[in-house]
Amino acid sequence: MKRILPVLGIALAALWYAAPAHAQGVSLAPHAGYNVDFEEFLLGASVGIPLRFGPTQLRLSPGLELYPGFEGASVYTFMVDVHYSLPVQDSNVDPYIGGGLAIRRVSVDTPFGGSV
């Protein structure tokens, strides 16, 4: 848990920094979910940053996920996605196609006083 607090602090600072930029087209997307591979709940957030190249609507979306339920371990994921918005007329839905890269860090405390 001690290792999650600095990461959580960085995530909250990023959210605080990104929130006023919403008026400039930057969006914030907090989320919660369940990871079926880890069988654990997660908390996360991502920031949507619009990238405009003429009529093409791309959005860069860096994000962070934390897994607070692991006892004796810390798990977090940093990801960067790119979304291509599909054109839809007169709708509140924003469908997109996307892909990205992620780095997951897992640290487990050992009974010998170290971590792996």
Image: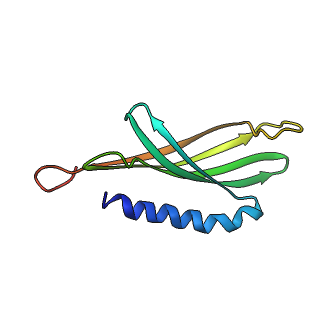
Residue shown at the point (51%, 50%) measured from the top left: 44
* Number of marks in the rendered image: 0
Q: Quadrant of residue 4?
A: bottom left
Q: Which percent across, then down, holds residue 25?
A: 75, 58
Q: Which percent across, then down, holds residue 101?
A: 52, 43
Q: Quadrant of the N terminus?
A: bottom left
Q: Quadrant of residue 99?
A: top right
Q: Which percent across, then down, holds residue 41?
A: 43, 41
Residue 52 versus residue 92: which sits nearer the camera?
92
Name the residue at the right extreme.
Answer: 90
Q: Which percent across, then down, holds residue 77?
A: 44, 48
Residue shown at the point (60%, 68%) measured from the top left: 17
Residue 100 versus residue 21: which sits nearer the camera?
21
Residue shown at the point (50%, 40%) measured from the top left: 33
Name the residue at the top extreme.
Answer: 36
Q: How is the image coloured?
A: rainbow
Vertically, is 116 above or below 34? below
Q: Is residue 24 left or right of residue 75?
A: right
Vertically, is 82 above or below 6? above
Residue 53 versus residue 115: which sits nearer the camera?
115
Q: Is residue 51 left or right of residue 15?
A: right
Q: Is residue 99 left or right of residue 110?
A: right
Residue shown at the point (69%, 49%) measured from the top left: 59
